[in-house]
Amino acid sequence: MLFVVLIAILSGCQSQTKPEVVQISEEQARSIVHRYQEKNSNNHKTTIISIEHINNEYEINWDRKSNCENGTDDVNDKDGTISRSSVTIC
């Protein structure tokens, strides 16, 4: 009887993981990066190379061939802010 009570108590104490709530879609994140990069580029075209969703952020790799530039922008999946941006010019 004690064993059954102990199992019931322990199983009730296990926390359930909450499902991840994403408010910004992948397409919205893509659009945010396009607008951000186009604003900073003097009319050079930005091409999105890849998008990966990691730890509440979209990691978006992009390329701008016209001036040999590429980079990565991290977009928060809750509010759409760019938390980190890195750029390389060859």
Image (cartoon, grey):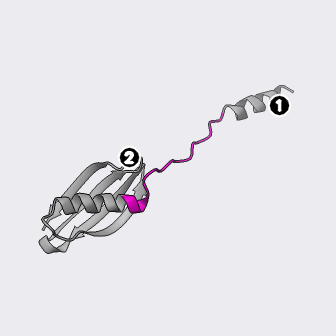
* Front of the two marks 1 and 2: 2
Locate residue 70, reporting x and y percent: 21, 66
Name the residue type under label 2. Asp
Which image quarter: residue 33? bottom left
Q: Nearer the viewer, residue 55 or 45?
A: 45
Q: Which residue is mark 2?
A: 79
- Which mark is first along the chain, 2 or 1? 1
Instruction: Find the magenta span and give its range.
Output: 14-28
Asked whether residue 20 is drawn in magenta, I would say yes
Vertical placement of residue 49 versus 32, above or below: below
Question: Could you tell me which secondary element the residue under label 2 belongs to?
Answer: loop
Q: Amino acid at mark 1?
A: Val
Quick one: label 1, few (<14), some, or many (20+) residues within 10 Å? few
Q: Residue at x 24, y 53 (%)?
A: 85
Magenta stretch: includes residue 63: no
Distance (Cα) linking label 1 and label 2:
46 Å
Magenta span main SS: loop
The residue at the point 71 percent across, 32 percent down is 12
Residue 37 appears in which quarter of the rendering? bottom left
